[in-house]
Image (cartoon, coloured by chain):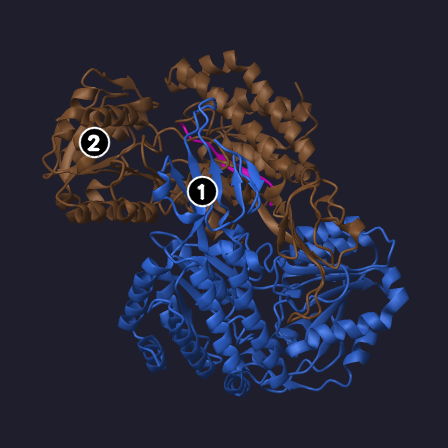
Chain colours: A brown, B blue
């Protein structure tokens, strides 16, 4: 075990302020190395981390299952997703486009005259990561925020989630060992614990950005701290989403059972503990769709939720909805068993949600869905707008139906618009977008997919630099062979660039 | 004159809350059109605006000169810069890369399985722009923030700067007329006035982002309001910069007079009223450089500053520096004439600035520069770090000198690193970066150059969409012929894309 891993392992229980300072200072020292590291080096660090996590899978999954109750099948798949994510970021930085390398040769005819300007992105510095409870691998210690920050060249300090402390510590050991073993500098990765530690971390002078996945309440509080610093820093929070689904009359007529089964599978998946859970489903009035969904979940029994706190919050949220004068419980018992979640299907109308959006259109984290019956398309779209910012929005229509007016509204409120299927399940890829208008996320970026890299980089331009003083990415000869834009023209590697 | 222009023209004096609501509602209605507009259409709007401003130049420049005292030569050049900027954004949106169009075909082998995902950027919505006093064209009503927001597809509401109200109103008329005349929707552009109006604008529910150029004090206050909204919005502020310059002993030995003349020209340009003004210049101790700079400005007399308030703040700032026990006045009179600015050259040491950075290393907006003498390179670099976030940082060295350790530190604190020349003069191009660590700017973006577009866009992904339901930018046939990334591979227009 390296010194770093030993230091990580010794931090059980709340990190002290002195330990946090030490981790931050080590991250700053590590940044002096990572900022100058090559994509080759960082890709090797990421791949070594992925390999180490895969190798530790049979130890980590049971630990995760004990702490999260998510089951070993789901957790095993999540490890694979997590390591594939690390490897995708390795591929992406080697490809090089993410640097946005741009070269303008001098042009004395412009106003003002243009000198030689060369721009690329550069890592921000040490990054704080707050993982989520519901994805103990993919959105936690070695999750997407950590992977994208390390890929960008930023050291990471993870604030471990209290819902899975032993898994967090052990994962942190594996990650720190793998990174340093692959040649990354000491201090490039640390794991800290404790509520007060998290508050101090967001305000720590060495921290240059924060990645956060969690609740609206907790996220907003940390966001506010980050913005109120003497030097505000970017706070990339993924907070809350209702994920509206709109089903047209034609779709319901053609495939009501398929849709009911699909919805039932999606909102109960992982006890509904997904940020992309479909919380509001708009269907034509009088269609009986809610009863079909009720039938589809009839055989589903209560399952343990991630924490007793989440279960209690869910029970409370569902009871609040069920107690609303305009809401009918179609299936399930709003009075949930302690610690567990059982599916609840609720029904109301667009008139009710438009009259009282604050009470009816908030996220209810767990296995419930609110079927909202609409009289016409205008009503349905008004309800979607009332939901507001979401990670996803879905339309189910029939081939040939005119969906443009619906898509227009879905695109307004969400970061990802689905045309079939259900929003749970977030592929990690180049084109993925996991973020949307407030309160889905706090910024105009994504926390999943290759472009998550952009969050931890800032642009830097060099003016009239001698070739030898430039980073390799911007030298005339393009020694790294990356895509670049020269005098406004995008040029692929191996093709001639415009000359001065 | 169109209705819009007439409405704009009628708004002299403070905008009322009802008028602001009306402008915001009109901007929201206009957004329904601009969000679906083509790049061709928006390019035509931008070019028509540029043409109209060029045509109005002989009317606008005298008006600007009356209100800003900047002189007609400088102001005529600034109109050309402003219209070239509008045309560059037109070119950029037609090229299409700014949309980051990305397509991933389905892949059932990934974990989780990958559906068909297609991502591009989409305009945010109505944008508020706060112009600066020191560039009444290029950073004001029709400046870079307005141009980039309109290019992105966002309606703009400009809060006119009180230092040039008549120019702002008249420019706004020209812009509104040109936009609507070229087919842009009514409400796409508005001009409002008044301090309270600005405060209300940043908090207005319809406003989705803010572009701001101005003081640290005013910018921070508006930034805080934007972040404390129930739905925080991006606040792109360019606030304050000291722009350190480091001159090596070898460079000074080789070309002291040239450097002194260059510095004198740069810090007195436009009465020093540039955000890129070189405020701190590090030179070897005992080099007599300050005296050379003093000689170079000896013939320069006081010139009227933009406003009496700016002149008073400058006099106050210079007097504060001059009154510091460790600062020597080498040239000029810290007791400035009311309303005017005359060059002041001050001298101190790295020991002094490191002992009292708060007093010595802040922006002093006007024609002054602080020559800081250093004993060795480590001292000099410590002083650069103490300056902190800046728009620019400059090194003057001799060919063959090892500058890597210097560049490393300059890159840490600034958004643009210069190797010769002086930081005033910000070319508008693809590779420009005008932004840097706090307090230079509030975010990881630029306010000048093509990539300023990214500030007013957010990503949107489509999942499993039928081809006909997709925006043209993401359809299989790539009808707009824009660069796209398909299955991770960047493909230029006219080349075959990977198939599913």
In the image, residue B378 lies at what x, y percent? 79, 51
Q: Chain for mark 2?
A: A
Looking at the image, is mark 1 or mark 2 nearer the viewer?
A: 1
In the image, residue A477 lies at what x, y percent? 76, 46
Q: Residue at x 51, y 61 (%)?
A: B237
Q: Residue at x 16, y 25 (%)?
A: A292
Q: Which residue is mark 1?
A: B119
Task: Tell me if residue A49 is in the magenta stretch.
Answer: no
**Which quarter of the figure has residue A18?**
top right
Quarter containing the C terminus of chain A:
bottom right
Indicate which disc residue B313 carries. Answer: none
In the image, residue B246 lies at what x, y percent? 77, 60
From the viewer's perspective, is residue B167 above or below residue A347? below
**Residues drawn in magenta:** A124-133
Q: Which residue is mark 2?
A: A318
Task: Tell me if residue A128 is in the magenta stretch.
Answer: yes
């Amino acid at each position: 075990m390296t010194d770093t891993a030993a230091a990580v392992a010794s931090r059980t229980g709340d990190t002290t302020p002195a330990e946090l300072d030490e981790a931050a200072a080590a991250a700053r020292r590590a940044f002096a190395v990572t900022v100058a590291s090559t994509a080759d080096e960082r890709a090797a660090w990421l791949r070594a981390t992925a390999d180490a996590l895969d190798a530790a899978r049979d130890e980590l999954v049971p630990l995760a299952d004990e702490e999260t109750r998510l089951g070993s099948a789901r957790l095993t798949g999540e490890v694979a997703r997590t390591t594939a994510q690390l490897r995708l970021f390795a591929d992406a930085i080697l490809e090089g486009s993410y640097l946005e390398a741009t070269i303008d040769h001098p042009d004395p005819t412009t106003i003002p005259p243009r000198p030689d300007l060369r721009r690329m992105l550069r890592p921000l510095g040490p990054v704080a990561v707050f993982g989520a409870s519901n994805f103990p691998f993919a959105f936690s210690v070695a999750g997407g925020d950590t992977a994208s920050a390390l890929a960008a060249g930023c050291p990471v300090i993870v604030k471990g989630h209290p819902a899975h402390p032993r898994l967090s510590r052990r994962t942190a050991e594996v990650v720190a060992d793998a990174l340093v073993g692959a040649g990354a500098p000491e201090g490039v990765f640390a794991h800290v614990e404790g509520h007060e530690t998290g508050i101090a971390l967001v305000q720590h002078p060495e921290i240059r950005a924060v990645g956060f996945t969690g609740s609206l309440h907790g996220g907003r509080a940390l966001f506010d701290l980050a913005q109120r610093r003497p030097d505000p820093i970017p706070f990339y929070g993924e907070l809350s989403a209702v994920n509206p689904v709109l089903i047209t009359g034609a779709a319901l007529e053609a495939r009501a059972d398929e849709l009911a089964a699909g919805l039932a599978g999606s909102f109960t998946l992982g006890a509904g503990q997904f940020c992309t859970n479909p919380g509001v489903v708009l269907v034509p009035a009088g269609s009986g769709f809610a009863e079909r969904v009720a039938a589809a979940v009839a055989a589903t029994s209560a399952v343990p939720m991630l924490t007793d706190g989440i279960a209690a919050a869910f029970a409370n949220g569902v009871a609040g909805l069920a107690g609303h004068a305009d809401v009918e419980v179609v299936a399930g018992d709003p009075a949930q068993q302690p610690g567990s979640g059982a599916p609840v299907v609720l029904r109301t109308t667009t008139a009710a949600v438009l009259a009282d959006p604050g009470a009816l259109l908030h996220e209810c984290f767990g296995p419930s869905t609110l079927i909202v019956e609409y009289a016409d398309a205008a009503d349905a779209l008004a309800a979607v707008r009332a939901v507001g910012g979401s990670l996803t929005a879905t339309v189910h229509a029939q081939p040939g139906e005119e969906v443009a007016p619906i898509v227009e509204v879905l695109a307004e409120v969400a970061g990802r618009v689905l045309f079939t299927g259900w929003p749970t399940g977030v592929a990690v890829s180049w084109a993925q977008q996991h973020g949307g208008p407030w309160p889905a996320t706090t910024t105009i970026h994504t926390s999943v997919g290759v472009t998550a890299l952009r969050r931890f980089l800032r642009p830097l331009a060099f003016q009239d630099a001698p070739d030898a003083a430039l980073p390799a990415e911007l030298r005339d000869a393009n020694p790294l062979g990356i895509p670049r834009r020269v005098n406004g023209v995008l040029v692929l590697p191996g093709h001639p660039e415009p000359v001065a």
